[in-house]
Image (cartoon, grey):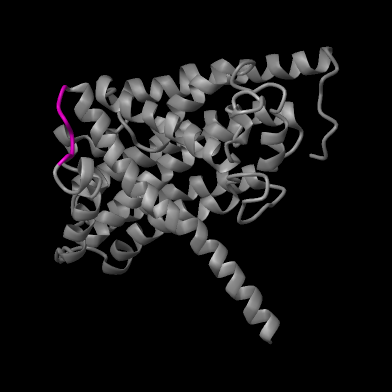
Amino acid sequence: MFEYVQVLGQEIYKILFMLVPILVSVAMIVWLDRRVWGLVQKRKGPNVVGPFGLLQTLADALKYIFKEIIIPASANKVVFILAPIVTMTLALVAWAVIPMSEDFVLSDINVGVLYLFAVSSLGVYGIIMGGWASNSKYPFLGAIRSAAQMVSYEVSIGIIIINVLLCVGSLNLKDIVIAQKELWYVIPLFPMFVIFFISALAETNRPPFDLPEAEAELVAGYQTEYSGMMYAMFWLGEYANILLMCAMGAILFLGGWLPIIDVYPINLIPAPIWMILKILFLFFLFALIKAIVPRYRYDQLMRLGWKIFLPFSLLYLVLTASFLFFFDKLPQGNF
């Protein structure tokens, strides 16, 4: 019994050791997002609360905590309350398989990629639940848009991941990083990296694909009827998902925790620092795109996903497989 409690305590400690930094970094990247947006528009961005405005997100979070939670009279109360909880939980649960270094991973499972894909697909449910339970036309339209968009771009993300798996021969995320010791996959699979990045923008409802929250026509999309901490949970889930997509991009294409070049002064930097720097680099691109690209029209968004990205990623998959087969470079992994 004592051993069981001890193991349970260790697991809870490991989970908190992973979750607390994620929640703190979500607060920090919201600040970074707003700061980049401000600088592109020749403004300062948040700079009042705390040094360089670093505590602005904390002030916003406190404001949400103390705000009243209003549930519309016509809403389905149980589903309405469950929706933000589902969104946030799924966004955080996915981090269990992300390796920050060779030793530092919460759950080193053999099907890490599959797990990530499954959990990120489930994220749509929180949004659909929120839109439907609000019992109002704008949230419902926003939820339908969001579901269609996420499903459309998940297909191309899946095919892009298969490209990487063909080169590695394993679904384990640590194996994928270790396989990039000689060459990061961003070089041979550069077109796939670009499509993955754009699909990740669509998958996380970021500009220029923030159609579900199009202020001009849908008020605030599926979040319209939410207030207080329930709104903040949607917002937390959204940013945790963005960070997750950046982590996936870093692991699949940018060599995860590996240093840029394996030479003396550079390889002294700890592995998790490299991983964090790569995630931050990808997030910086996310923030920059938000500031400089206009929003897509809904039909353009669908056309891009189904008529351009899907055929192109399929074609590249065939090319990758052919190249590996003809040059006898197929991995002798255990699929």
Is 30 contained in the magenta span? Answer: no
Residue 312, can we see it?
A: no
Front residue of this view, candidates 258 and 143: 258
Instruction: Report the side of 249 relative to 125 (left or right).
Output: right
Instruction: Report the side of 39 relative to 171 (left or right).
Output: left
Image position, residue 275 (x, y; %) = 54, 38
On-image quarter of the C terminus: top right
Front residue of this view, candidates 164 and 276: 276
* Extent of the magenta region: 42-47
Residue at 82% across / 17% down in the picture?
Answer: 325
Residue at 53% across / 28% down in the picture?
Answer: 156
Residue 119, can we see it?
A: yes
Image position, residue 126 (x, y; %) = 38, 54
Image position, residue 303 (x, y; %) = 40, 20
Front residue of this view, candidates 240 and 111: 240
Residue at 68% across / 21% down in the picture?
Answer: 183
Residue furthest out toward the front: 265
